[in-house]
């Protein structure tokens, strides 16, 4: 049963009740004005009860309405260029190569809205639905993991810019090394007068790592680092050769391959207050180890932590 059938039945019940209890009572019961009833009654007496069924009305045609051909061209152009908006579509259709169709941007938008394509996501989703069939979501890839059998087999090392310490000459950098088997980390803060940490400073941290591993009964076998000048220097490579360890440099542009040293550096920085570091608002203590000489940067503080 359609909506027209329901409405026609409602009006027939009105006429039936009006014949039994009167026009005024029937109109009051159905909530219809008496003038409307008498207008319907005149039509029924002339054309029969079928006139009570709602008539189908054609869609009004406005004098300035776009022609069917223009609407087809607008929809075709919008689907061919789904990233363009109404203003751009209207300006492009004015060109001779597209037929020189003169239509306003508002007219383009109303045309696209009538076809359910008024927004860019709707046009893109329609095109994607026709071009690519549905595919079930792929299974999640396993999380990358570095296989290490014993402590000291692979140690990641990295540096991180902290900030500037009031009262010192130079920037503060954090050097971090972490054993990829035990997740035990070493950290040092160094003062750099020019640029990044030097190979001399990174070599000092490497010697410390090797000494503490040796004291625990393990040996430093390999260090994983990036391609910075602080790890490419001859002093750093010579230090690791004397320690009996090898150096592995990651590929350029892949800092995540330094193992867990970079995440450990970020966590230690956040635990210290994040950037800007609290060191930027405190004065160095006399026993901090900060050097004021212009020869080479020195270590300001050292700390050992366990990576969480």
Image: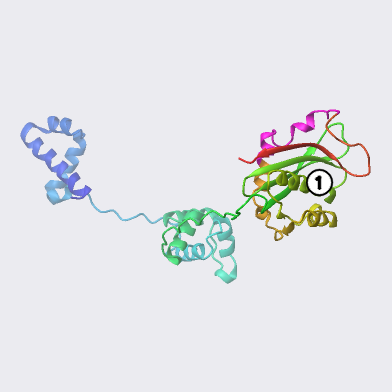
In this view, the residue in front, 42 or 147, is: 147
Residue 41 x %, y %: 14, 42
Q: Is residue 199 magenta?
A: no
Res. 41 visible in picture: no
Residue bearing the label numbered 1: 204
Mark 1 Cα within 10 Å, few/some/many (few <14, many 20+)? some
Residue 44 x %, y %: 14, 47
Can you name the residue that lies furthest to the left here?
20
Please state, as top left, top right, bottom left or bottom right, where the C terminus lies in the image.
Answer: top right
Left or right, 145 with respect to 18, comes to right
Res. 238 visible in picture: yes
Left or right, 273 with respect to 75, comes to right
Q: Which image quarter: residue 251?
A: bottom right
In this view, the residue in front, 141 or 146, is: 146
Residue 280 x %, y %: 79, 32
Q: Residue at x 87, y 46 (%)?
A: 194
What segment is highlighted magenta in the picture?
Answer: 267-286
Q: Residue at x 77, y 32 (%)?
A: 279
Q: How many marks?
A: 1
In this view, the residue in front, 56 or 211, is: 211
Q: Is residue 283 magenta?
A: yes
Left or right, 87 with respect to 14, comes to right
In this view, the residue in front, 238 or 17, is: 238
Q: Which image quarter: residue 58?
A: bottom left
Q: How is the image coloured?
A: rainbow
Q: Residue at x 28, y 53 (%)?
A: 57
Can you name the residue that lies furthest to the right here?
294
Name the element at disc 1: helix
Residue 35 x %, y %: 20, 36
Compared with 278, 235 (above or below) is below
């Amino acid at each position: 049963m359609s909506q027209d059938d329901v409405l026609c039945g409602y009006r027939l019940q009105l006429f039936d009740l009006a014949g039994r209890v009167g026009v005024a009572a029937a109109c009051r019961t159905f909530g219809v004005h008496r003038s409307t009833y008498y207008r319907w009654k005149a039509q029924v007496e002339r054309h029969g009860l079928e006139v009570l069924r709602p008539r189908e009305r054609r869609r009004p045609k406005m004098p300035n309405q776009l022609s069917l051909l223009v609407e087809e061209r607008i929809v075709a152009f919008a689907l061919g260029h789904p990233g363009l908006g109404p203003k751009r579509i209207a300006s492009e259709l004015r060109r001779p190569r597209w037929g020189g169709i003169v239509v306003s941007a508002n007219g383009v938008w109303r045309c696209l809205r009538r076809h359910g394509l008024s927004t860019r996501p709707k046009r893109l989703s329609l095109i994607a639905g026709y071009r690519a069939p549905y595919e079930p979501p792929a299974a999640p890839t396993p999380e990358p993991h570095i296989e290490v059998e014993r402590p000291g087999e692979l140690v990641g090392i990295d540096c991180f810019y902290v900030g500037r310490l009031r009262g010192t000459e130079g920037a503060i950098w954090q050097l971090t090394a972490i054993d990829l088997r035990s997740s035990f980390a070493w950290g040092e803060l160094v003062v750099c007068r020019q640029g990044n940490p030097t190979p001399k400073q990174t070599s000092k941290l490497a010697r410390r790592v090797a000494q503490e591993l040796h004291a625990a009964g393990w040996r430093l076998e390999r260090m994983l680092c990036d391609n910075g000048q602080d790890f490419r220097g001859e002093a750093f490579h010579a230090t690791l050769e004397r320690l009996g360890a090898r150096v592995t440099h990651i590929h350029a542009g892949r800092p995540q391959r330094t193992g867990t040293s970079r995440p450990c550096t970020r966590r230690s920085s956040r635990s210290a207050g994040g950037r800007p570091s609290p060191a930027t608002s405190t004065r160095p203590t006399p026993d901090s180890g900060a050097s004021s000489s212009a020869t080479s940067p020195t270590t300001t503080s050292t700390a050992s932590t366990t990576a969480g």
